[in-house]
Image (cartoon, grey):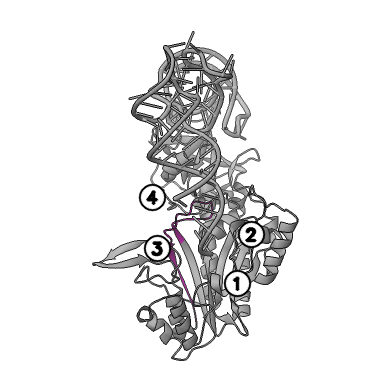
Amino acid sequence: MQRDEQVVPIRSLVDFVDQEVTLRGWLQAKTGKGKLVFLQVRDGSGLCQAVVLRGKVSEAAFEAAKAATQESSLLVRGVVKADPRAPGLPGGYELDVHAVTLLNEADPYPIQPKEHGVEFLMQNRHLWLRSSRQWAALRVRARVVRAIRDWLDTQGFLNVDTPILTPAAAEGTTTLFTIDYHGEPAYLAQTGQLYNEANIFAFGKVYCFGPTFRAEKSKTRRHLQEFWMVEPEIAFCDLDGLMEIEEQLVSYIVQRCLEECTHELAVLERDTTALQRVSPPFPRLHYDDAVAKINAAVERHETVPGYPDLLPPIRWGDDFGSPHETFLAAQFDKPVFVHHYPTQVKAFYMEPEAGRPEVCRSVDLLAPEGYGEITGGSERMSDASQLVAALERHHLPLETYGWYVDLRRYGSVVHSGFGMGVERTVAWICGLEHVRETTAFPRLLNVLRP
RNA sequence: UCCUCGGUAGCUCAAUUGGCAGAGCAUUCGGCUGUUAACCGAGCGGUUGUUGGUUCGAGUCCAACCCGAGGAGCCA
């Protein structure tokens, strides 16, 4: 092989039909028939079938191709041919091979092109990443992340990131990871929201975007110990304004994926008809009405897909369980906002509804198809004395939250914000069974390695 | 923390009432000019999660423990 040969990415093979090129990558799979060997070559940008015919390459190259093990790294040189029989990504093009150079012969590869168990795949996550579905899901994730930043950046939001090492629980409810901060206990952040609230007074509209940590013993398809969350916070924004921002952002993300991740969604065999409906406005459901809907379904002895038991009844004032959320989401063909949750089940900083303090100006966005809550947000309490009373009610130390109360003492304004979980959003868009496939190295309960 | 299910070859699984530990794939060898998880023939591959118990005999029954999966609670 010559140093000056043209190495091209598989994704752009369409531009090189009938030209001689070199592909550089890994042998994803191999099949053949006597004097014919089909090499499925993966280069990170796509997958291409390279056809090696005895007599068209040197005898040594033919034998090397025939003997090459799965995941060996190699160079293949040949002429790009359009052929509808050719599998791959994007597919329809194959390489009529003139030369094969084996770079590294792989040891027997543990992951085969067949069904494997979850435990085995997770133990081999570093290799599982090479599989087509993982490739597709992580590319969608990257597109989702870029869409989030694109939309927020062009809508006047400033990215101001917040600390990961924090001195206290922000919400006081969930279990945090504790670390030793030079002899003082500190915690891995579960949210950047309180800091975001400080930042809006300087920048108006901000968002933080980074990893978030929850030490809960949650072991479900929707939970990770470490996940990424984007948290926009907006000054001079009430609950209605917040919902408008959320539905625009979510719709933008989905539409970008539909337009630019067609190959990836095809690999994932995602039925995109439901996604195509995702555009503003999203339905809005008051908590009171949600409770009524649930209990009416309970009367009818309904069950929820994915849950073996009958839909359990709910008392006004309780938070929804997973079956309730799945049931509510199933009533609509788009993501649905549920707003005005009971004050007692939500965080201390949420603004109570005027004249009805038992509910607060909060909103969760429930994704369709059982993917659960993908955003949670609220209008924030903007009155200093009311906030102090709320802190006392929740037994939270004033000395820790003094700076947070200050924000209400120096030019307080109506403001709102929300957090969106990247992994749940990606899982929903990709139609994945479990959020673990939406991040390269998921941190799950009892899964810390690789 | 609780509930349910599971652990047999590198992987995916089978093994009847408690009676010789099996198959496909991977790997090795041979054959095949259009394969898509190819196909045909041969070979290799085992401390049945661990410990103890019942039994003439345990993959199978009992107990404890370990590990995994899904779910509840909690959450994004």
For mark 1, what is the residue? A341
> Mark 3 packing: few (<14 Cα in 10 Å), some, or many (20+)?
some
Residue under mark 2: which chain is it in?
A
Spatial separation of the CA atoms under disc 1 and disc 2:
14 Å
Q: Residue at x 61, y 52 (%)?
A: A431
Spatial separation of the CA atoms under disc 4 and disc 1:
35 Å
Q: Which mark is residue A16?
A: none
Q: Which badge, 4 or 2, is on the more N-terminal residue? A: 2
Tag 4–tag 2 contact (CB < 8 Å): no
- Circle 3 — which element? loop
Task: State the image coordinates of residue A408 (x, y, percent, origin top left).
Answer: 46, 87
- Circle 4 — which element? loop
**Residue toward you, A436 or A36:** A436
**Residue toward you, A195 or B69:** B69
Q: Residue at x 45, y 84 (%)?
A: A388
For mark 2, what is the residue? A324
Q: Which badge, 4 or 1, is on the more N-terminal residue? A: 1
